[in-house]
Every structure is written in C-alpha cells, then in structure tokens.
Image (tube, helix red, strand yellow):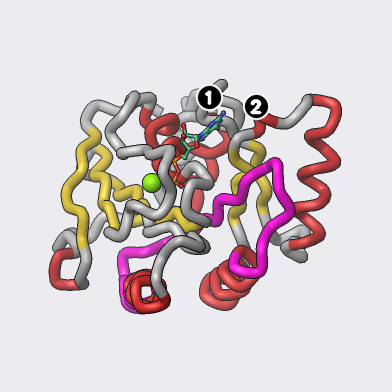
C-alpha cells in the first residue's frame, strides 16, 4: 500500500460534522488505551498523525482520516474507561452508536483488543453489535510485542474463545511497535472496503 496523502479531516462530535464524501470507511472500535490511534499511525507509517496518549479516556471525538481521497480510517472514542462519569459514558456510547447505525459509507467496523488480556464484557458486547451489523468480525490483537513469543498463541486462543469467534471471523495479531500484522491489516482493510482490485498481488495480466 503506497500512501501519498493522509490527513485528519475532522474530529466530529455530531453527524452533521461527518465528511460529506462517498469514500468507503472502516472504523476502529475498542477500549480506551487499547492502541487504536497507534494502530492507525502504524498503518500509515506516520509517527503521530493520530494522537496517542498514555492517559486513557481522552478521545471523545470521532476522528476521520482521509487516505488519498479514496478511503477514511475512522478512530472511534474508546470505551471502558473507569474514571469517566456515567453521563460522559452515555454520551460516548450514543456518539458511537449514532455513527455505527447511521453511516452509509461505513463498510466495516474492526474491533481492537489488547493481546495481553482476556476480552472484557464491553469487548464482548461490542463484538456482538459488530457481528449483528455486518455478519462477521475483524479483530486485531494489539500490543503483541508485549506478549512473550512462546505465549502468543495461547493469548490469541483465549481471545478467540472468549469473543466466541468462528471460521467466518478474522483475528490478526498486530503490533504498532514492531509492525507485526501491518500487511495483513492492509489486505483486510482494502478487501473489506471494496478497494482491493487485485492489482497488488504481483500477478501480471497479459
Ligand atoms: N508496546 C506497545 N505499546 C503500544 C502499542 N500500541 C499502543 N501502545 C501504547 O499504548 C498506549 C495507548 O495507545 P493509543 O494508541 O493512544 O490507544 P487508544 O486510546 O486506543 O487510541 C500508548 O502509550 C501507546 O504508545 C503496541 O503495539 N505496542
Ligand atoms: Mg486514541
């Protein structure tokens, strides 16, 4: 994937701020601090286009990243941050729900979970919502560099079974730190947003 231009179009808080374009969109959902912004930066190989934070719970906007006027990567607000008021949590949930249930350009919602931990109840309900909406799940296990290589399969199995994944679903190990899974992530993104025309498979058509 050769990216020429990637930029933040808008940090939206309401639907009227969503970009008025028809490019396909893929959204990234997950707990606060799971590594959504780092995931996007790694996909784009940009250091800090998407703002990352060691303090969770900051991002309460829907961030639209325009990729070469062909695609939007959409960074959703993180859920599951304990130090946030009930009212604030409700606001975030409705912000996510409004986007996911009304956005026609949305082709796929991917779920990010932390490779080190068993998915939470929030992750499981997010996954249920995603599967109901699109019929399959695309899940990335983030921060794989923090799991011992010999333990990684065990952790991936735990995620697979806790989320109740099946053959229809895709689970991709990822690390924003090392770049693990980046190629697989792009393949999935292009395929699921309908942008994969098979031109990048190294096959020459006569
Ligand atoms: N070691 C490691 N740290 C990561 C990785 N991805 C994210 N982080 C760190 O986890 C923290 C939260 O990441 P961020 O992308 O802001 O999470 P977000 O809240 O989901 O957007 C930051 O300190 C990141 O540097 C990863 O793949 N490996
Ligand atoms: Mg973030």
- Can you give x and y, in whole percent of width and height, for residue 7 in the image? 20, 38
Label 2, secondary structure: give it: helix
Q: Residue at x 47, y 53 (%)?
A: 32
Image: 101 above or below 126: below
Picture disc at residue 145: 2
- Can you give x and y, in whole percent of width and height, for residue 42 in the image? 43, 30
Which residue position is annotated with label 1?
177
Label 1, secondary structure: give it: loop
Whether residue 154 is visible here, answered yes or no, is yes
Whether residue 100 is visible here, answered yes or no, is no
Query: Is residue 21 a member of the stretch shown in magenta?
Result: no
Q: Give the range drawn in magenta.
A: 97-122
Q: How crowded is mark 2: few (under 14 residues within 10 Å), some or many (20 or more)?
A: some
Quadrant in the picture for the N terminus: top left
Q: Who is closer to the viewer here, 80 or 194?
A: 80
Image: 79 above or below 149: below
- Can you give x and y, in whole percent of width and height, for residue 169 in the image? 68, 58
């Amino acid at each position: 994937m050769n990216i020429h231009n990637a930029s933040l179009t808008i940090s939206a808080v309401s639907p009227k701020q969503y970009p008025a374009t028809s490019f396909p969109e893929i959204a990234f959902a997950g707990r606060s601090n799971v590594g959504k912004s780092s995931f996007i930066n790694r996909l784009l190989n940009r250091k800090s286009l998407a703002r990352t934070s060691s303090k969770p719970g900051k991002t309460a906007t829907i961030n639209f990243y325009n990729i070469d006027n062909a695609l939007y990567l959409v960074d959703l607000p993180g859920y599951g941050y304990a130090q946030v008021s009930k009212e604030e949590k409700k606001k975030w949930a409705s912000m996510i729900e409004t986007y996911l249930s009304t956005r026609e350009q949305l082709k796929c919602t991917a779920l990010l979970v932390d490779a080190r931990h068993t998915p939470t109840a929030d992750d499981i309900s997010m996954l249920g919502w995603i599967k109901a909406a699109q019929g399959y799940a695309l899940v990335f296990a983030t921060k794989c560099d923090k799991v011992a290589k010999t333990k990684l399969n065990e952790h991936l199995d735990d995620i697979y079974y806790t989320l109740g994944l099946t053959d229809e679903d895709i689970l991709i190990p990822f690390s924003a730190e090392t770049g693990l899974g980046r190629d697989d992530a792009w393949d999935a993104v292009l395929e699921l947003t309908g942008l994969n025309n098979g031109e990048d498979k190294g096959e020459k058509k006569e």
